[in-house]
Image: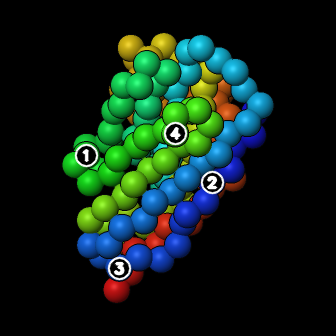
Amino acid sequence: VRLTESGGGVAQPGGSLRLSCTTSGYDASAYCMGWFRQVPGKEREGVAAIGSDSSTTYARSVKGRFTISQDDAKTTLYLQMDRLTIEDSAMYYCAVERGCNVALMKWWLRLELGSDSFDWGQGTQVTVSS
């Protein structure tokens, strides 16, 4: 499985960015895909996830501001980030777990189910600064 993020950069508070994650090498009928972020010295945290049934879940801190989606072929994952704040600055990673139980996606996003079977991208930096 190969995941490649793009779209990171610098934005002003209140601005927008759109992240993309292209995927290849996997074929699973059941999966969870998501965006996670990490700042130095802190644990990685889940931002948003989408399941193979197209259900979505969001971290409380981004709900109403961020939107996760996929293209029709389900080979590209997006994260539309609006009304950015300085606290959104982080390295953003996309991840996929094949065979994920989408009914448990809320806990999957919180990393409470473990992440040993995740496939991760290399990350893309988002910096929100005035």
Question: How dense is the environment of label 3, judged by Cα within 10 Å: few (below 14), some, or many (20 and up)?
Answer: some
Locate residue 47 relative to residue 27 in the image: left or right.
Answer: left
Q: Is residue 37 above or below residue 14?
A: above
Q: Label 2 near label 3: C-beta < 8 Å?
A: no
Q: Are marks 3 and 1 in contact (CB under 8 Å)?
A: no
In three-dimensional space, the C-alpha distance between marks 3 and 4, rounded to whole angstroms, equals 27 Å
Distance Cα–Cα, label 3 vs label 1: 19 Å
Quadrant position of residue 91: bottom right
Q: Amino acid at mark 3?
A: Gln
Q: Which residue is mark 1?
A: 63
**4 and 2 marks in contact (CB < 8 Å):** no
Nearest to N terminus: mark 4 or mark 2 = 2
Residue 38 visible at all: no
- Identify the residue at image location x=56%, y=15%: 30
Question: What kind of residue is marked 2?
Answer: Glu
Q: Could you tell me residue 89's position as x and y percent?
A: 43, 67
Q: Name the front one of labels 3 and 4.
A: 4
Tell me the mark number nearer the camera, choosing from 4 and 2: 4
Amino acid type, mark 1: Lys
- In the image, 116 versus 54, the foreground residue is 54
Instruction: From the viewer's perspective, tell me whether residue 26 is left or right of residue 14.
Output: right
How would you rate the neighbour count of disc 1 (Cα within 10 Å): few for under 14, some for 14-19, many for 20 or more? Answer: few
- Position above or below: 4 against 51: below
